[in-house]
Image (tube, helix red, strand yellow):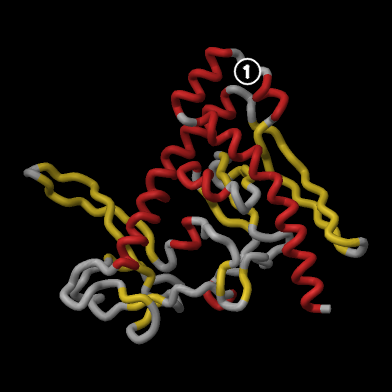
Amino acid sequence: MTKHVLLNNIAHKDLKVITRHSPDYGDNISAVLTFPTEFADVQREYPILLRKDDTTGDFQAVALLGLAKNDNLFLEDGGWQASYVPAIMARGPFLIGFQEQEVEGEVRREAVIHVDMDDPRVNDTEGEAVFLEHGGNSPYLERIVTVLNGIHSGMSYAAAMYQALAEFELIEPVNLNIQVSQDEQYSLSNFYTVSDERLAALDGDTLVKLNRAGFLEGAYLIKASLTNIKTLIELRRKRLAQRA
């Protein structure tokens, strides 16, 4: 269940949020949405793959966190074992909503912050304070605002980027057959990536068009990120050795 309410410094003056990561907080997932606005950070540690939304058929990007369902290989001892946490995970119980507000006599649809009061990380006694004693935003909330802004801008940017990559036929299916050990193998299907062959064959005008839009960098970051499959294999092997 969720209970999304508009965040404000009066009703939520004592609000705190537990920031550690745990399966108890829904963090034990094998893939999470990611956005071009964070690809430069994500590609250093996670494989980035594309998949199609089941409802719309539009492409989305995901960062792989594990090889098996409900197995986040970056979770360990209540912490996240990577230098960068993908934005969707870093935002905690917060999300962006929209509200009509009058600005200079004009009614506009403005972005506002909502919090899920049913999230198990939300409480009044433990964790990071959301507001300062006299009502100002805490440093924690300021970080959350930055994360949410990145998600918000990344969503619209992503739609334009994937549409452009599809237009130039740069997206192709990919099936990953991964062998962790003699007894453990994984086959990951229904994913897509950027085609090396088609990217290399682009003419100059198309390269300039994609580069000016900022989409060319994103395409190369997706390709480069696939080397992190090796990271997932090593993390899985480490986990198996710890259980042995």
Residue 176 vs residue 135, the one in the foreground: 135
Label 1: how many Cα within 10 Å (few below 14, some 14–19, many 20+): few
Left or right: residue 70 versus residue 131 is right
Q: Position of residue 90 (x, y in %)?
A: 46, 62
- Residue that extends furthest to the bottom in the rendered view of this protein: 125
Q: Position of residue 87 (x, y in %)?
A: 47, 56
Does residue 207 sit above or below 100 in this rendering?
above
- Residue ID at (52%, 74%): 25
- Residue 153, quarter of the rendered image: top left
Does residue 146 sit above or below 114 in this rendering?
above
- Residue ID at (20%, 51%): 100
Residue 54 vs residue 219, the one in the foreground: 219
Left or right: residue 190 versus residue 143 is right
- Residue that extends furthest to the left in the rendered view of this protein: 105
Q: Position of residue 203 (x, y in %)?
A: 60, 13
Residue 183 vs residue 235, the one in the foreground: 235
Q: Which residue is mark 1?
A: 202
- Residue 140, quarter of the rendered image: bottom left
Helix, strand or loop at label 1? It is loop
Three-letter residue code for mark 1: Leu
Left or right: residue 234 versus residue 47 is right
